[in-house]
Amino acid sequence: MKWISNLVSGYVRTANFVVVGVVSVLVTLGGPPVTTLVSGTLQTVFYYPFAKLKITVTHMTGVAEENERLQLVLREATLQLSNVAEVRRENQRLRSVLNFEPPPSYTLLQARVMSVSGTSAPVSAMINRGSRSGVAPGMPIINQYGLIGRVVSVFENVSTIELLTDPGHRVAARVAETREMGIVKYRPWEGMVLDNFPAEGKIAVGNEVISSGLGGTYPAGLLIGTVRSAERMLDEPFCRVLLDPAVDFNSIEELFVLMERR
Amino acid sequence: MAIIPYLLYLLLIAFDSVILKDAISIKIATINMPVLVVMIVALYKDDLTAVWFGFFAGLVAASGGPPSQLGWQALIMAAFAAVGSLVRERLNLDSLRARLLVILIGVLLHNLISLALSRSDGWLVFVFSYVLAGAVYTTILAWLFFLVKEGRLTAEKIKAIF
């Protein structure tokens, strides 16, 4: 019985392979119509999903790379844009500075603020001009809006200036319209004031306060500020005059050292 | 439902052809996934199943190439499956080396036939680079497959190494 089983088994195996072989030959002999049909069907069933997946992944990878590149470009563009805005602002400042005329018998030395120090308000600053540029202690510092302060210490290439906002700073001043005099000082709790202004003196809100030229440090006529309020106290010999500074001390950048002509 | 695993094997062959082959090729050495799958099926299934699976695996593998080779490729793969089945009956399946040797020889032969069908000149260079390297690479994958299948390589063991 065993040899019959082996014979049948061997016959089935051979027959099976012969059938497969015949089908294969038929596929080949069928030519392009058959091979294209079989190939197309198999491609649609087995290859298409993976090909679609590959295309999608490739596309998404491309999109991710492009997104990364565009973000880099955007960052660079934003940086350039902020630089352009800064250059535009500087251009506007410098244009207004160009029209600025120094007081008679003085020349202007252009300088730039390097650093500012102070706690509640800036009280001193460092500028990029020193003895090599002819700067000397005591020289007034101004910008196109008005008086800023004076030079207190000088090095070869840099100088330190004391701003009007320093509580120890005093400027002999007068009201431009009435010529009444006083002393400008800065008090941290109430701001810039015109001190020692007589109670009977003529003053009004909006009047300009300028340097009087007395005391020798500052030339006459430099704008310090405008009168914000003026109060006359009972039994007090002086007025309480508060000023709005002509200069915004929190944003000083370009300024001038006033140098006397020789 | 018994046909589902075989459909998955055929999908694996297509997946290898479209995506995997480019990703895991080392230079010109590529894994011959169709022969590997057909030989593994031939080693573990009966000859009737193996031959017909070889036939369809050949069709699927060849449908990614020129249609004129469709029938021949199907016949070659069916023949490989038939030979694999015959060898299995005379083989000690417990021996890992014997199984790997069958797969190595199968891939080597198939790579040689593919080379002979596709390239006319400079074939000696490709014998060493494509045929031999590809056969070794495929055998290494088969070795890993057998290790995993027999539970000799598990995730816990890999974790224990690190």
Image: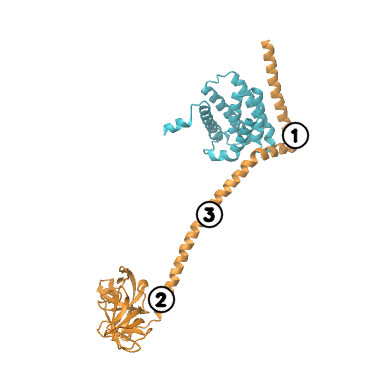
Same chain for labels 1 and 3? Say yes or no. yes
Residue A166 locus on image (x, y percent) = 28, 74
Chain B representation colour: cyan
Residue at 56% over, 49% down: A60
Observer-nearest of A130 and A149: A149
Any part of residue B18 in sight: yes
Q: Chain of mark 3?
A: A
Residue at 55% over, 50% down: A62
Residue A196 quadrant: bottom left
Q: Earlier in the sequence, mark 2 or mark 1?
A: 1
Answer left or right for A35 relative to A62.
right
Q: Earlier in the sequence, mark 3 or mark 2?
A: 3
Answer left or right for B137 relative to A245.
right
Q: CA distance from mark 2 to mark 1?
A: 88 Å
Quarter of the N terminus of chain B within the rendering? top right
Secondary structure beneath label 2:
helix
Chain (orange) = A
Which of labels 1 and 3 is toward the front? Answer: 3
Secondary structure beneath label 1:
loop
Q: Residue furthest front?
A: A234
Name the residue tied to disc 3.
A67
Q: Callout 2, which amino acid?
A: Leu
Which of labels 2 and 1 is toward the front? Answer: 2
Residue A206 locus on image (x, y percent) = 38, 83
Same chain for labels 3 and 2? Say yes or no. yes
Q: Callout 1, which amino acid?
A: Gly
Residue B6 locus on image (x, y percent) = 63, 30
Residue B40 quadrant: top right
Name the residue tied to disc 2.
A94
